[in-house]
Image (spheres, coloured by chain):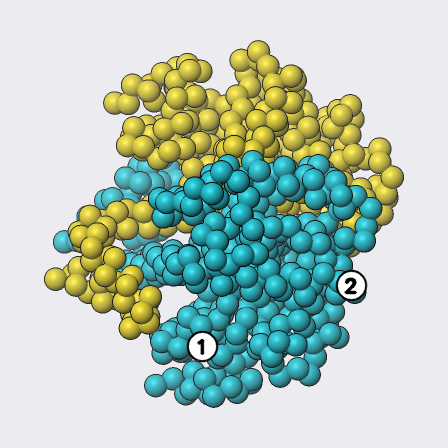
Chain colours: A yellow, B cyan
Amino acid sequence: MSKLAQSVLSGERLSLARLLTHVENDTPEGREALDFLFAHTGKAHLIGVTGAPGTGKSSLVNQIALSFRKLDKRVAIVAIDPSSPFTGGAVLGDRVRMRDLAGDQGVFIRSMASRGSLGGLAQATSGVVQVFDAAGFDVILIETVGAGQSEVDIARLAHTTLVVEAPGMGDDIQAIKAGILEIADILVINKADHAGVESAERALKSMLDLAHPVPKVFQHHGQILPAQRESGKPDSTDPKSILWIPSIWRTIATTGSGVPELIGAIQAHATHLHQSGEWSLRERARISAEFDLFTYQILMERLRASLPESKFEQTLDSIQKRKISPREAVNVLLSKDDK
Amino acid sequence: MSKLAQSVLSGERLSLARLLTHVENDTPEGREALDFLFAHTGKAHLIGVTGAPGTGKSSLVNQIALSFRKLDKRVAIVAIDPSSPFTGGAVLGDRVRMRDLAGDQGVFIRSMASRGSLGGLAQATSGVVQVFDAAGFDVILIETVGAGQSEVDIARLAHTTLVVEAPGMGDDIQAIKAGILEIADILVINKADHAGVESAERALKSMLDLAHPVPKVFQHHGQILPAQRESGKPDSTDPKSILWIPSIWRTIATTGSGVPELIGAIQAHATHLHQSGEWSLRERARISAEFDLFTYQILMERLRASLPESKFEQTLDSIQKRKISPREAVNVLLSKDDK
């Protein structure tokens, strides 16, 4: 069907770049291609990497990409950048990346800026990831910044979520990460050659104890191995363990120190996900969220098409004049739509 | 109708607290009360305060609240905390607040944690703000952390958005704020007694020049005063100016230094919004976004009610097996729903 999708499947990089733009802009061509490519997805390992500015997260993502390349994996990087198109943020990040990864046909980098619409960024990211997945990239690194709902939404896309910290970011920064810690499968203290690495690790450990009083798996499967429940600390590098307790790893992204060990932990997590059945559960959750998003999109498009624009404006007028509440107005509009 | 809503209108604090919980949890009682109270909203000045951890934003919010109290304004504080309920973040913040503001009947503080659902936090925050508005609070301070889509969404609620910086947060932090700068009406450099305040102000000024190459108002009204276009720098404390270029203010929240001047700028902005017509435009944008959110919610509830749960599960199964794409599946399901 979709010519563009066909050439993406055959590994054509220029078509890939073009399709990504279509998907980001949610064009009809992009939608058609996504429908066509969907059957080819589900093979890639999606790895979310999140962390505050100043943790050296981007350099770490580059090092992780380089390490996977040495294992002969094809790697895509999706960098979510909350800064606006005209400020230098995303561009600068890409330049640094280009230096390390330029000319390698096994790597593809895509930066994405925030979108205004409801769930827009999560949806666009999901589409971009599906294109890379279908195009045969083995590992897809999804890099997000900071703590916020959008980061959590995007982390839900990933099979494995890395949370990156750095020593000396202050107690306040640590506290803010609490919400993010709950989504972490693997914790990384980057800049491990900086002062304060010991206290950063202590802080993370105590937060982990708070964040994981009941092992995650217990909520999903309703069963737990007695020995694991007692010890509370199974070996998180043992993929046969039903439990996964996040482990903490030290890296120095500027030299690559600690990165091979981190790759080992990432791969152990993938094996764990497969053996525990969690891989499929996470995929199910992702599909379910995406289903909701499409339902919203399609229902809204139908509604807008079925009613004249002036009707919407009149309704907004009535709300702004406090004649009717927003929820009541929606109910009135939808009941008219039924007739 | 709603007894709870009635006692909130009559200024009953315990009912207010109870209603806020209903609204946060989106209960039927909460929804009914919001519909009832909506006619009483639209009077409060909604002020968003956003900034990275470590900028002293919470202390500044307290000082702003104290200053508005001296002007005999009733003040509500809505603190959006991305950390989870069981970690200490929100609780600690509230304790600090209690010390300064405890026992003052003209102040009400509410902390809110992040929600998982699509647009959930923005919706809950909007509801909480409406309750405070109807309850007669003159000023509602909405405090959010960091840079991210959720912060931008919440900033859209506000009439006036303050972005708080601090000296010495590093270039990386500055860069990340670029997206946030675009939503700023007023910039604050807090901790102005710390080293680096000059260079922080220089950095902000140069980012402002980048972020506001064309004055905002030009996009809305399609007209601009020639003198303002030439100078490019109208006095942002002059409310009669059609243009509003964000101004930069220095504060020391620990002593309250600079806060009265900041309050002056906030009030000048409110006057500007009224005189330029922007107040009504911002409200319209907010109402429109809320309308979309309710439409989504109601359409999804109807769809779920009209189809058996097993049908959804079967559909998700087919998607997970890559037999059908998510978008195609939604279209199939919705076309069945039509019959």
Residue under the image location 48 percent in, 84 percent down: B8
- For mark 2, what is the residue? B254
Q: Are marks 2 and 1 in contact (CB under 8 Å)?
A: no
Residue sitting at 64 percent across and 58 percent down? Answer: B83
The crowd level at tag 1 (other Cα within 10 Å; few <14, some 14-19, many 20+) is many
Q: Position of residue A32 (x, y in %)?
A: 29, 30
Residue that protrudes farthest toward the front in the picture: B227
* Viewer-side residue, B278 vs B304: B278
Q: Residue sitting at 60 percent across and 79 percent down?
A: B72
Is A108 drawn above or below residue A147 in the view shown?
Answer: above
Chain under callout 1:
B
- Provide the secondary structure element on which disc 1 rests: helix
In this view, the residue in front, A241 or A123, is A123
Q: Is residue B90 visible?
A: no
Identified by mark 1, the residue type is Ala
Seen from the viewer's position, the closer of residues B43 and B234 is B234
Q: Relative to residue B144, is residue A324 depicted above or below?
A: below
Closer mark to the observer between disc 2 and disc 1? 2
Q: At label 2, which amino acid type do we have?
A: Thr
- Quarter holding the C terminus of chain A is bottom left
Q: Chain of mark 2?
A: B
Label 2: how many Cα within 10 Å (few below 14, some 14–19, many 20+): few
Dot 2 lies on which element? loop
The disc, 2 or 1, on the residue closer to the chain's N-terminal end is: 1
How far apart are the two marked residues, 2 and 1, measured between alpha carbons?
Answer: 32 Å
Mark 1 = which residue? B134
Quarter occupied by the N terminus of chain A:
top left
Q: Residue drawn at (59%, 41%), measured in percent from left and top?
A: B208
